[in-house]
Image (cartoon, helix red, strand yellow):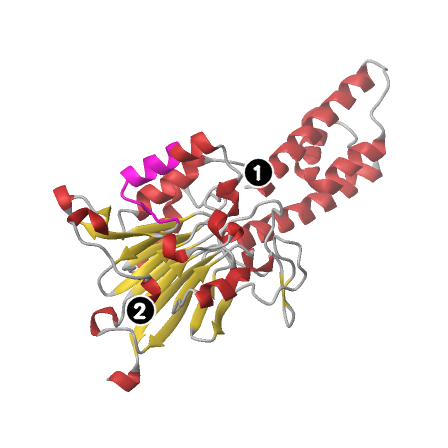
Amino acid sequence: MILVYYLLFINIIAFIMYGIDKAKAKADKWRIPEHTLIFLAVIGGAIGAGLGMKVFHHKTKKNKFRITVPVLLVIEIILIIFCLFQNYHLVVTNYSYENDKITDSLDGYRIVQISDLHNQFFGFGQKRLLSQIEKCEPDIIAVTGDVIDTNHTNYELAMEFFKGAAKIAPVYYITGNHELWLDKERFSGFLSDIQNMGVHYIDDTVVDLKDYLLIGVGDSTLRMGVDPDSFEYVEISDKGGENLLYPVGNNGTERDGSYRDDNRFKIMLAHEPSFHNVYQNCGMDMVFTGHYHGGQIIIPGKGGLISPDFEFFPELYEGMHEFGDTTMVISRGLGNSLAPVRINNYPEIVVVELKKSKADN
């Protein structure tokens, strides 16, 4: 959305400046330099400049403007179409994953991962995004942070996404680095709102889903150092017809030992791929992460150009990676933050289908 806001702003400015210069010409006053008017067209304001020339009948006889502005206008329209397609064309990446811990009941289980939305707009009510998710037929939707962006914060877009997603499948959400920088009181209200919609917020929580354990770790915990044995155990309960999380200890039972002693399949939701050694030490079978935005620009033969931490050509920018017994999935994400444009790096929905190990069949 930053790119869209910029283009609207610079073209409105260009249109106004051409109008002001025309008015000054009529009044025989000091004029705006011609190189300034051309520069506005060069930096993305060619549409506004062209409209200004036509509406105000200004600079239409000077070759410098009569030729240059229309050429820049055509180039700008081509670039706008290209950039919008690169930033809004949703793709679905499918992975199949086998593990001998996957039970018969989990065979064919589909996990849809959504990461780094960053307030990106995918149609009114986020309809385009939600429609694609629904077509993936998820058993759960895993949201791995940075749904809201601190540089152009818009809670409403995030709320629309969660409201629609919760109607498709159970949604589990952990925070990324951008959520850490938001106003604490406003973000707390946002969490309350989405939990009322049925979204499960699972920072530093172990969710017992019977056939497997789902562990959520918030980005603040990653940065401070993970103490997984301190995570709260919860389970799904349908009390009162609601699909809510309840502490396991509420029913009078206590859990002995760490979840790492549990032999069931373990999935972790986290935000940053760089902590893969932590995930491995925690005994995870599978981890879903994001954060790197696919390196923003993917160069064929080289990979993602730059990470949010300003690492050039990071190794971990997308895909499925093995670290011992831990498999980490990295989503390229959906939105942008400071850098407004993706190139060769379409917004991505990740789908992982769990498969029972063939050796067990």
| Alpha carbon separation for disc pair 2 and 1 | 38 Å
Q: Residues within 10 Å of mark 2 (few under 14, many from 20)?
A: many
N-terminal-most mark, 2 or 1: 1
Please name which of the two marks, 2 or 1, marks the residue nearer to the observer. 2
Residue 47 percent location from the top left of the image: 66, 37
Is 15 magenta? The answer is no
The residue carrying mark 1 is: 151
The residue carrying mark 2 is: 265
Secondary structure under the numbered disc 1 in the rendered image: loop
Residue 30 percent location from the top left of the image: 86, 18
Residue 224 percent location from the top left of the image: 52, 50
Image quadrant of residue 54?
A: top right
The reply, left or right, for residue 256 in relation to residue 64 is left
The reply, left or right, for residue 6 in relation to residue 245 is right
Is 195 magenta? The answer is yes
Closer to the camera in the image, 86 or 179: 179
Q: Is residue 31 above or below residue 120?
A: above
Q: Is residue 26 above or below residue 101?
A: above
**Amino acid at pointer 2:** Phe
Q: Residue at x 82, y 19 (%)?
A: 25
**Amino acid at pointer 1:** Asn
Q: Residue at x 78, y 23 (%)?
A: 21
Give the magenta part as a residue range. Answer: 189-203
